[in-house]
Image (spheres, rainbow, N blue to C red):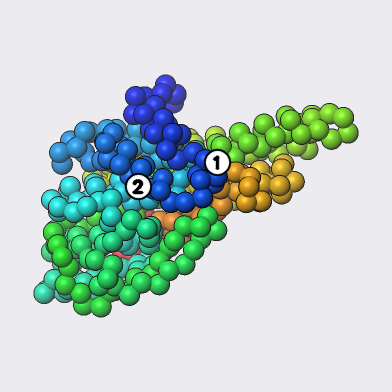
Amino acid sequence: MNTAVSAVEDLARRVFSEHADPQQLLLQGDETWRSNLASVLEETGLSQAFVAEAFGGAGVSGLDVGRICVCAGESAVTYPLVELLLVHRLAAMADLKIDAATTTLAPARLNDLMCIDDDGRVCGDIHRITLSPEHQSVLVLAEHESGCQAAVLTLDDCVVHQATTVSREVRCSLRIDATTPDGLATLPSGTASAAILAGAVLRSCQMVGALRKSLELARDYALDREAFERPISKFQAVQHQLARMAGETAGLEAAALQAATHLEGVFEGSAAAWQAGVCAKIKAGSAAREGARIAHQVFGAIGFTREHVLHRYTNALLSWRDDYGSETDWARRLGNAVLQHGGDEFWPRMTAPQESFADRIRQLEAQG
């Protein structure tokens, strides 16, 4: 894997370190950073990084889009970056003129389906939608016999039920009852499920950054903290746990960035893109669980205090693992694809080219 830092990654890391440093935000204690970060993301063009050249964008590679999210994860930023990137992309595809910075995206779960009638009215119940202070409207993707309909609704037209995650982010449920949208456009069939998978890939990349920083904090603490007149990093049990966390981090990074290289293919119906994305989100969930546990064990639970920065990363990991489908949701889809062909076909299909197995995943997605 090419580990060279691209210009896009370098820019993203500088932006998030200067405008969303977690310790500075903790000390600052207010939300003024959100508008500052939004302005910088727009000025630098990072907010539109996922808009392809075909739709008037800069044509940034999927890998670099993933790396932008990694940099955001390294700051444990609670700004809705993934939603911003996706809304910009989908609005460009649909030629909808909307303010992406104030628009969230729905649906965000595999089994949540919206519908739109022949009169263009949207209805349905959707859950775990990212809702931030800047959001005033929602871009809803609803399947119709004519294709996937992209509808823009103001949040005032929806019944909103809010809940707060462990990372103090807001996730909400929306009830939409035969509402006429402010804007409507047609996208290719399957765009709704493609957007969910793209969100899963980008969220996995964010989790790479958060897990990296958690490992870095745990390692540095183990080198500095002494017990029985020597650093705790000299104890074999601590070394074993840090090595295990490093392995989880490396595994997630490989899976997530591999999926990011196929990111463009998610909207093109690429079988390899679907398989890579599914595997990345499954790995992200398990790595987050193990990584958060080990980091706090090394710290002796000190990192749970409000003043310590560690909990910002570990709480983000535990929250993000359920966004855009949890590892259980995706593993069930993957398992169903395997079981369709029985035990005798398991190994031949696992070792077959990616496309044949991933085609089956896509068929199951289409069946809901």
Q: Is residue 24 visible?
A: yes
Residue visible at 13% across and 59% down in the picture: 185
Res 287 quadrant in image: top right
| Mark 1 residue crowding within 10 angstroms, few (<14) / some (14–19) / many (20+) | some
Please say if 146 is above or below 305.
below
Q: Residues within 10 Å of mark 2 (few under 14, many from 20)?
A: few
Give the Cα separation between the discs numbered 2 and 1: 18 Å
Q: Which residue is painted at 60% across and 43% down in the image? A: 309
Q: In this view, does 355 lie to the left or right of 246?
A: left
Dividing the image into 4 quarters, which one contains the N terminus?
top left
Q: How many marks are shown on the rendered structure? A: 2
Write the residue at 15% across / 65% down.
182
Query: Of callouts 2 and 1, which one flags the residue occurring earlier in the amino acid sequence?
Result: 1
Q: Residue at label 2?
A: 35
Give how far across and how far down residue 69 sits, in percent. 40, 40
Q: Which amino acid does label 2 sit on?
A: Ser
Q: What residue type is labelled 1?
A: Gln
- Identify the residue under disc 1: 23
- Eyeballing the image, is 120 above or below 74? below
